[in-house]
Amino acid sequence: MKLKTGLPMREWINEVPNDGLIRYMMHGNIERVFLTSPKAIGEVLVQNSYDFVKPKLARDTLGKLLGFGILLAEGEEHKFQRKHLLPAFAFRHIKDLYPVFWSKSAEMCQAVTKFIREEISKEGKDNGDGVVVDFGSWLNRATLDIIGIAGLGCDFESLKDPHNELNTAYRQVFTSSRQAQLLALMNFILPVWFVRLLPFKRNAEIADAAKKIRDVSRRVIVEKQSKLEKGPAADKDILSVALESGAFTVEDLIDNAMTFLAAGHETTATATQWALVELSKHPQIQQRLREEIRDKLPSIDEDARMTSEMVDHLPYLHAVCNEVLRFWAPVPFTRRQAIKDVVILGQYIPKGTDVVLVPYAINFSKALWGEDADQFNPERWMGEKTANNGGAESAYSNLTFLHGPRSCIGSGFAKAEFNCLLAAIVGRFEVCLEPKDKEIELQTGIVTRPKGGLKLRMKAVDGW
C-alpha cells in the first residue's frame, strides 16, 4: 500500500543513484520500472505514448465507476475521443464557466458561514475561536454541483441536499473500509469478474452506486438529445459541446459523462483539501493570500459576475495553487504497461513490463526542483520567469497532469475551478486544523486524500 502512495519512490529518486530508470520487483517477482528523469518521461508519455497502456486490472476495476470514456480508452479509440472532446476543453469555453465556478464556491461559503453562526448561537457565546467544520464533505458536494452544471448542464443541488442520490452514490464509492481494502488485494490474485461475484457488502454497494451514476448520466444525455432535436442549443457545458459534434454514440457519451462526474469532482475537492491543510500549517501564507483576494476580488456576498480576467490577475493565488498541485498531486502514482518490446533511454524493456510514473516522486526531485523540493514554498512560482514552471527547467519536472496525448484533458478546467474555490474559501474564512497539531495520514484510492476526512476550525473573517 505504501508503494501505491508513491512515498517510497520519493526517497528513491533522491537517494538511489540512477540514470533515469530504477528497476524494482513486486510480489510474485513482477518487474517494474520507475521513470526518474524528464527524458525518460518524455519518451514514454510523448514520443511513444501509444506503446504503453493502462494495465488490464486498472481498466477492469475503474471502468465500472468511471465508465470506459477518454480516461480508459486506448489506441485509435483514445485518439478519436480526444480529438472530438478537445474543443469542449478549449480556453474559449473554460472562460465562460468561471461564473459557474464562482457562484457555487460562493454558495458553499455562504452555507458554511450560516452553519458557523448557527453553531455559535447554540453555544450562546462567541469566543472568537471559530467552529469545527467537516469541510471535506462540503467540498465534495460543491465540486459535484460544479461538474454537474459545467460538465453536464445539470445542477444536482448537492449543497442543498447532501442526501441526494448522486452524492450518496459517490460517498459509498469513495468511503474506505477494511472490506474494500481486502477486495482490492483479492483483485491482484483472482480475476476481477470472480471477485465481484463474491457475497461481500462492498460489492453490492459498488454495483448499486455504479448503476445510479450510469442511470443519472443516461437521463441527462437523453434530455439533452431531446432538447437538441428541437433546435440548436446555447448551452456551454462540456457534454453539450460533445453532443453537438455528432461524433459520439449515446453509450460513448454516458461513459464520458461518468468519467467527468467522478474524476471532475473528486480530484478538485481533494486538491482543495490539501491546499487548506498547507494553509493551516502556514498561517502567514494564508494571511497574505487573503489580503490579495480581498484586494482584487468582489465579496462572495456581492452579486458580481466573475470573469477569468479577474481571477487571472491574482499572482499569489496562482502561486499557491500551483505549489499545492506540485506538492499534493491528487493522483500520486500511475502505471503503464508496454504493449510491445520497447527501448527507454537506450534500455531494452520487454513487452508486458509495467512502467510507473510517480508525481509524488518527480515533483519532489531535488535534481529537478532544488534542495527545497520537499518544502511547501509558493514563492518558487512568483518570479518573472518562473510563474509557469516554478523554476524547474523541464516541463516534465511536474507530473501532476501528466504530459502528451494522455495528459489530463481537463487540466485547464480543474485549475480554473480550483482557483475560484480557494479564493472564495480563503477570502471568507480563517482556517486551521482541528486539532491544530494533527498529523495528517494518507488515504489511498482513486485519489489520495486526508484519511478520515478534513476537519477544520473555521472562523468567518469580517470585512468581505
Image (tube, rainbow, N blue to C red):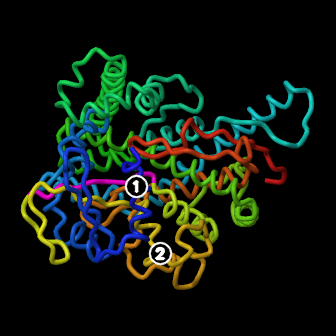
Return the residue at label 1: 6
Task: Give the SS element for disc 2.
Answer: helix
Give the residue type that dot 1 points to.
Gly
- The quadrant where residue 286 appears: bottom right
Residue 372 image point, x, y percent:
56, 74
Q: Is residue 244 visible from the viewing direction of this image?
A: no
Which residue is nearer to you in this view: 156 or 37? 37
Return the residue at label 2: 366
Give the farthest residue toward the top: 199
Q: Is residue 408 visible from the viewing direction of this image?
A: yes
Give the left or right position of residue 123, taking residue 388 as reference: right
Query: What stretch of residues is rendered in magenta?
Result: 330-339
Give the left or right position of residue 145, taking residue 48 as reference: right
First in sequence: mark 1 or mark 2?
A: 1
Q: Residue at x 26, y 73 (%)?
A: 40
Which residue is nearer to you in this view: 210 or 59? 59
Give the left or right position of residue 425, taking residue 263 as reference: right
- Tag 1: Cα neighbours inside 10 Å, few (<14), some, or many (≥20)? many
- The quadrant where residue 406 appears: bottom left
- Tag 2: Cα neighbours inside 10 Å, few (<14), some, or many (≥20)? some
